[in-house]
Image: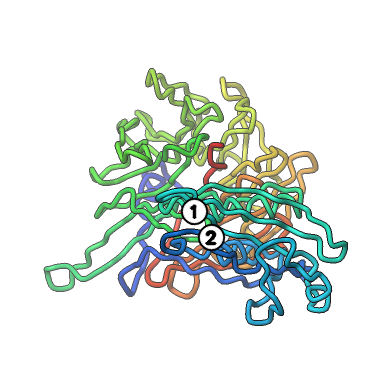
Amino acid sequence: MTMRYIATPLAAALVLALTLVLTLANPARAELQIEITQGVDTALPIAVVPFGWQGSGAAPPLDAAAIVAADLARSGRFAPLDRKDMLQKPTTGADVKFDDWRRQGSEVLVIGRVLQPGPDQYEIQFQVFDVLRGEQLLGYRQPATAADFRRSAHRVADLIYEKLTGVRGVFSTRIAYVTVVRAPGQAQGQVKSSYRLVIADADGENPRVMVESPEPIMSPAWSPDGRQIAYVSFESRRSEIYVQDLRSGSRKRVSARPGVNGAPAWSPDGRKLAVSLSRQDGNLDIYTLDLNTQVLTRLTSGPAIDTEPAWSVDGSQIYFTSDAAGGPQVYRVAADGGRAQRVTFEGSYNARPRVAPDGKQLAVVHNDRGNYRIATVDLARSTTQVLSSGRLDESPSFAPNGEMLIYATREGARGVLATVSANGRIKQRISALEGDVREPAWSPFPPN
């Protein structure tokens, strides 16, 4: 959760409840719409030919090649050829005429077929060719069922992306986000709110509402294995932390202590949460909570507001936001306790730290000449690079390969999501077809 720092612990506690009170004009729909707003000038020309169908039953439930092409285009690194401009549509390597693809300017060619080994069983066979050399770069068979066909097509895109870039693809990962809907209530002038925690594929498809409440939901955080989500709910009219299993939907309340219970962050081994609690003294501090024993370990103390913890990759350190220096800056403390050290020094405001998968950078919300923007901080050099260009950008979250970040921003009066590459060159805007979306969190890689 991103907090605007104010004078008293009581006011700080109120911020938790207020940060999700968002203005909406229309009921929200679950679907997200992604628009590439900035790519790279050197996007690689690629042709993804419609895959052939070889089966006895009905055609596959989805167009695998279209999903692959859309994934690669959305990365900003590739420029797929429009199908209507293809001179041929081969489905096997023997049918490929490389001269035709060279004349059209394609440098990489993807072809394939979908086979049906049995009922509700599919196999996506594909090949990737270097057009200029006329050589195969990759050939693979990806199994699928009707239920997970889209996920399998994303996996194909992941394999192609990794082969061509050397970086693991994230198309088969997921995102979590919060939506809020306001609608007229029964009483005159009354406004009824509905908050939803939603899980969707990285392209916004297959949305699934995990929790719905008339009270705010915030700070979703993925477990390291991607099977659980921790989040803060105000359904009891006070902040409480829950952990929910994504497959079964079952959930457990893990912290409902007096005062503020906020900002859960999983340890890399999945055994603990770092949390921000106010407890008896009313001041927000960082604690670790052992999920098996419920043992709390206090890591910070004093009059400062300490919140928004994030674990280092190796689990030895916890980064957090504190106003100990008079304004919000990022600090770190050993996960077993000790003296906190300040990490950020550039600018008057750095908050909501999130650690890059390689552990070398932090993503933060940074005050850039009066605008709150997403930036990265190089931990070795202590340098800051501003990536986004909005006025009120918040809640950054790294993709598990470290190539992109997702964050919340504003589009007029609406809350939308956006992504930006770690070098700031590729940007996208993600908005609900109706309504408001906030608090994004990118999942880890799916289990193999």
**Residue at image coords 28%, 42%:** 238
The one of 256 and 424 positioned closer to us in this rendering: 424
> Going by the image, does 318 lie left or right of 190?
right
Q: Position of residue 435 (x, y in %)?
A: 37, 69
| Front position in the image: 65 or 241 | 65
Residue 17 in picture, x, y percent from top left:
34, 51
Residue 372, numbered label? none
Alpha-carbon neighbours of circle 1 within 10 Å: few (<14), some, or many (≥20)? many
Amino acid residing under circle 1: Gln
Q: Is residue 227 left or right of residue 25?
A: right
Residue 427 sits in which quadrant? bottom right
Q: Residue at x 24, y 69 (%)?
A: 183
Q: Earlier in the sequence, mark 1 or mark 2?
A: 2
- The relative height of residue 86 versus residue 31 in the rendered view (above or below) is below
Establish if 70 lies above or below 2. Answer: below
> From where the camera sits, is residue 5 visible?
no
Instruction: From the top left corner, tell me how far across and down residue 231 is, in percent.
Output: 39, 42
Disc 1 to disc 2, C-alpha distance: 7 Å
The residue where tag 1 is placed is 116
Q: Is residue 360 visible?
A: yes
Q: Which mark is residue 54?
A: 2
